[in-house]
């Protein structure tokens, strides 16, 4: 089974994919993580699910990453939590690579967080 052009990500409230949803401008995908320090990122996509940009916050830079992510999502026009479908992407930020990166084995990994998406492409992930 080939990797789809748009990767489904199911929102799971209270878990790794709690901060995903849609707004008037398209899908958004947010993550809080600890990779040597608290970091938060918000990936923004257009209405076709194509990557637009990533906003990031790093506690080492004086940000409160968790609060900044919540504020950024609240500022999106008509943001509503829910399942999304977005294109693979890769972006270097904060000295790390972030993205939904496909491999040759029908697998897409959200790095650096380590969530794996696989057939049957139902939006659920492996850690």
Image (cartoon, grey):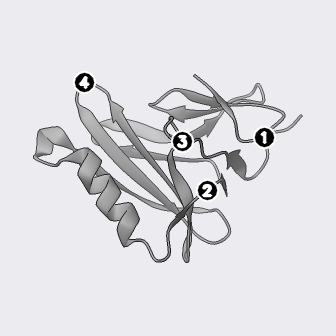
Label 3 residue SS: loop
List the residue tagged with mark 3.
17
Residue sitting at x 10%, y 46%: 62
List the residue tagged with mark 4.
36
Q: Nearer the viewer, residue 89 or 123?
A: 123
Label 4 residue SS: loop
Q: Is residue 75 left or right of residue 124?
A: left
Q: CA distance from mark 2 to mark 3?
A: 10 Å
Q: Earlier in the sequence, mark 2 or mark 1?
A: 2
List the residue tagged with mark 1.
122
Q: Earlier in the sequence, mark 3 or mark 4?
A: 3
Q: Earlier in the sequence, mark 2 or mark 4?
A: 4
Nearer the observer: mark 2 or 1; the answer is 2
Label 1 residue SS: loop
Asked if residue 41 is positioned above or below residue 55 in the image, the reply reads above
How crowded pointer 2 is (Cα within 10 Å; few <14, some 14-19, many 20+) is rated as: some
Q: CA distance from mark 4 to mark 1?
A: 31 Å
Nearer the observer: mark 2 or 4; the answer is 2
Where residue 109 sits in the image (x, y, percent)?
Answer: 60, 32
Q: CA distance from mark 2 to mark 4?
A: 29 Å
Q: Earlier in the sequence, mark 2 or mark 3?
A: 3
Q: Earlier in the sequence, mark 4 or mark 1?
A: 4
Residue sitting at x 49%, y 38%: 14
């Amino acid at each position: 089974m080939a990797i789809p052009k748009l990767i489904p990500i199911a929102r799971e409230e209270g878990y790794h994919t709690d901060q995903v949803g849609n707004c008037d401008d398209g899908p958004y995908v947010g993550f809080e993580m600890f990779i040597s320090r608290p970091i938060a990122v918000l990936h923004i996509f257009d209405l076709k699910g194509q990557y637009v940009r990533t906003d990031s916050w790093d506690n080492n830079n004086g940000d409160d990453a968790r609060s900044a992510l919540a504020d950024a999502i609240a500022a999106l026009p008509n943001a509503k939590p829910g399942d999304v479908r977005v294109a693979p992407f890769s972006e270097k930020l904060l000295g790390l690579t972030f993205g939904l990166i496909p491999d040759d084995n029908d697998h897409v990994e959200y790095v650096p967080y380590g969530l794996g998406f696989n057939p049957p492409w139902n939006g659920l992930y492996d850690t």
